[in-house]
Amino acid sequence: MNYWLLLIPVLSAFIGWVTIRIAIWLLFHPLQPKKLAGITLHGAWPSSREKIAAEIGRYAASMISPEKITQQISFDEIRPLIEQHMDHFLRHKLQEQMPMIATFIGDKTIQQLKVIFIQEIELLFPEIINKMMIAGSGPGNMESIISQKISTIPAFTIEKMFNEKMAPAVKKAALLGGLIGFFTGLIQLLIALLT
C-alpha cells in the first residue's frame, strides 16, 4: 500500500477549510474589481453596496410609518410630561406674561384648562406625527436617508462588524468545510484502494 494515499483525506480537509475561508474573504475583498485569469473579482459587499443599501432602506422605511409610530409611542406615555409642562405654563409663565389674566385663574380653572388642552393635544398627536413624517422624513425620504447612510459605511467597517459578530459562525463554517473535505478525501482514498 502506498502511504502517500493517506494524505488524501488530510489534503481534502485542508482544501475544504481554505475554500470556506476564501469564500468568506470574498464577501469583502477585493474592494476594487480585479482581473484574474479573465475573471473579474470584486467583493460581494463592495460590488453590491448600493443595491443592498437600497433594499435595507426600503425595508426600514416600510417599518417606519406614521401609523406604526403612533402605535409604538403611546400618548399615555408622554401625557405626564405634557401635564407637567402645562401645569408649569399655567401657574408660572402665564403669570409672568399676562399678570392680569393670572389673577382670575385659580387651581380649579388651571385643572380644567389642563384637561381641555391635553384632550386637544391627544387629538392632534397622530396628525402631528403624520405631518412630521411627510414633511421632513416621510417614507420616501426615510428610505433614501437610510440607503445613503448605509451606502457610505466603509467596507472595512462592515467587515469588522461581521468578523466581530459572526466569528463563531465563521469558525463553524470553516470547520464544516474541513469535515466535508475530510470525508470526501476518505471516499477518494477508499476508491483509490479498491481500484
Image (cartoon, grey):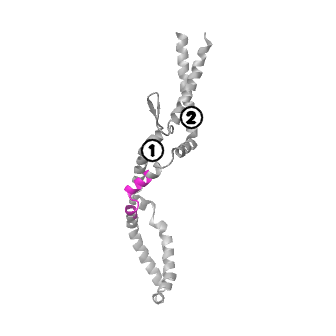
Going by the numbered disc 1, the residue's amino acid type is Arg
Q: Residue at x 45, y 60 (%)?
A: 72
C-alpha span from label 2 to label 1: 26 Å
Q: Position of residue 2 (x, y in %)?
A: 60, 11
Q: Nearer the viewer, residue 144 or 5?
A: 144
Q: Residue at x 58, y 22 (%)?
A: 11
Figure disc tally: 2
Q: Main secondary structure of the magenta part?
A: helix
Q: Quadrant of the N terminus?
A: top right
The numbered mark at residue 98 is: none
Task: Work out whether mark 2 precedes mark 1 in sequence or the reverse, and give the earlier one.
Answer: 1
Q: Is residue 79 above or below residue 191?
A: below
Callout 2: helix, strand or loop?
helix
Q: Position of residue 75 (x, y in %)?
A: 45, 66
The numbered mark at residue 172 is: 2
Q: Residue at x 38, y 59 (%)?
A: 138
Task: Check disc 2: other Cα within 10 Å, few if <14, some if 14-19, many if 20+.
Answer: few
Query: Is residue 195 a member of the stretch shown in magenta?
Result: no
Residue annotated with mark 1: 49
Q: Is residue 100 above or below residue 130?
A: below
Q: Position of residue 85 (x, y in %)?
A: 50, 75
Going by the numbered disc 2, the residue's amino acid type is Lys
Q: Residue at x 57, y 19 (%)?
A: 8
Q: Is residue 156 above or below residue 87?
A: above
Name the side, left or right, on which 13 lies relative to 98. Answer: right
| Quadrant of the rendered image containing residue 16 | top right
Q: Position of residue 100 (x, y in %)?
A: 46, 90
Callout 1: helix, strand or loop?
helix
Q: Which residues are magenta?
A: 132-147
